[in-house]
Image: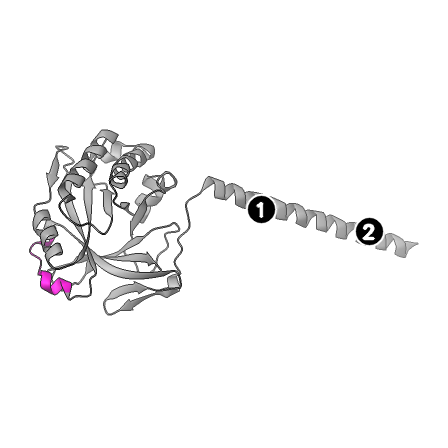
């Protein structure tokens, strides 16, 4: 009889363990679904071990993506040797159209924009553009987008048209904006750009994209992520990675920002 009791107890323990494991599995599945609903941002699809260097430039290759390198330029780069840049292995340029002054709030053209975009066309380099925003309202963001469209209208823009908002110092207007306000401002700019037939993109450091805007509300657009490191720890989707601000590129004096654009195969 004692053996029968032991057998019954063992069966009960097995049943209890099975129920516990089933409930845990159901709970984990529910938690994963809830987490996915709470954070619908697509994950970073790239494998860290597949980044490598080809010469002095990063590269990435897998079955789903290939990559090309580009530089972003403005009046800060001074006079560019476009023939040398063309032969440097750089495939595209991202040119600053202008910026909004954080003290005056006035839109100001980049003093080198016209020369840079004309030379990029002359040397057959693929081109995108960006605007440095300090918009404090949706209306100002829309004004910036319309300004950019006016400035680029005569040119072929094959690469994205980018919204770039950053903190400057403790007195800039951007610091007074909430996360939702910054998100709405980025959306307002990008909607106008996208409606005009261009690819809209949002630039930011990894912390900016993660903390200062809500990427989940901006998934209609692409992201350009800045992180100066050998590996990417940013967990969310992006299309372009600014991986250094101290790169060396033929044709550009001093340090250069170098970007890796991921291209779906």
Tell me the residue at 68%/47% (across/down). Answer: 20
Q: Does residue 239 show up?
A: yes
Q: Is residue 135 magenta?
A: no
For the C terminus, give its image quadrant: bottom left
The residue where tag 2 is placed is 9
Above or below residue 168? Residue 77 is below
Residue 128 in the image, given as x and y percentages of width and height: 20, 50
Q: Is residue 82 magenta?
A: yes
Label 2, label 1: how many angstroms apart (C-alpha)?
30 Å
Q: Does residue 137 show up?
A: no
Q: Nearer the viewer, mark 2 or mark 1?
A: 1
Residue 132 in the image, given as x and y percentages of width and height: 19, 42
Tell me the residue at 35%/40% (across/down). Answer: 218
Tell me, for residue 142, which label it has, or none.
Answer: none
Badge 1: few (under 14), some or many (20 or more) residues near its Cα, within 10 Å? few
Left or right: where 219 falls relative to 74: right
Residue at the extreme bottom: 55
Which one is earlier in the sequence, the residue at label 2 or at label 1? 2
Residue 25 in the image, given as x and y percentages of width and height: 62, 48
Left or right: where 180 falls relative to 119: right
Residue 169 in the image, given as x and y percentages of width and height: 20, 39
Magenta stretch: dominant secondary structure: helix
Tell me the residue at 22%/52% (across/down). Answer: 158
Above or below residue 122? Residue 186 is above
How many marks are shown on the rendered structure?
2
What are the residue bounds of the magenta stretch? 77-86
Element under disc 2: helix
Element under disc 1: helix
The residue where tag 1 is placed is 29
Tell me the residue at 22%/58% (across/down). Answer: 70
């Amino acid at each position: 009889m004692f053996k029968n009791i032991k057998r019954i107890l063992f069966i009960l323990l097995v049943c209890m363990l099975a129920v516990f494991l089933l409930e845990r599995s159901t709970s984990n599945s529910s938690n994963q679904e809830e987490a996915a609903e709470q954070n619908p941002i697509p994950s970073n699809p790239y494998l860290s071990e597949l980044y490598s260097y080809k010469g002095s430039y990063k590269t990435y290759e897998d079955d789903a993506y290939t990559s090309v390198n580009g530089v972003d330029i403005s009046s800060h780069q001074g006079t560019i040797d476009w023939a040398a840049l063309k032969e440097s292995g750089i495939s595209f340029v991202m040119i600053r159209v202008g910026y909004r002054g954080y003290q005056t709030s006035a839109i100001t053209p980049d003093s080198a924009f016209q020369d840079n975009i004309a030379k990029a066309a002359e040397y057959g380099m693929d081109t995108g553009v960006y605007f440095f925003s300090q918009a404090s309202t949706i209306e100002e963001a829309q004004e910036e987008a319309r300004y950019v469209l006016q400035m680029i209208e005569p040119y072929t823009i094959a690469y994205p048209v980018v919204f770039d908002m950053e903190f400057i110092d403790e007195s800039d207007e951007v610091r007074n904006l909430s996360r939702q306000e910054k998100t709405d401002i980025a959306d307002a700019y990008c909607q106008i750009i996208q409606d005009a037939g261009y690819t809209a993109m949002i630039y930011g450091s990894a912390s900016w994209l993660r903390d200062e805007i809500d990427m989940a509300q901006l998934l209609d657009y692409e992201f350009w992520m800045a992180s100066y490191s050998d590996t990417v720890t940013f967990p969310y989707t992006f299309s372009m990675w600014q991986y250094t601000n101290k790169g060396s590129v033929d044709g550009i004096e001093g340090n250069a920002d170098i970007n890796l654009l991921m291209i779906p195969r």
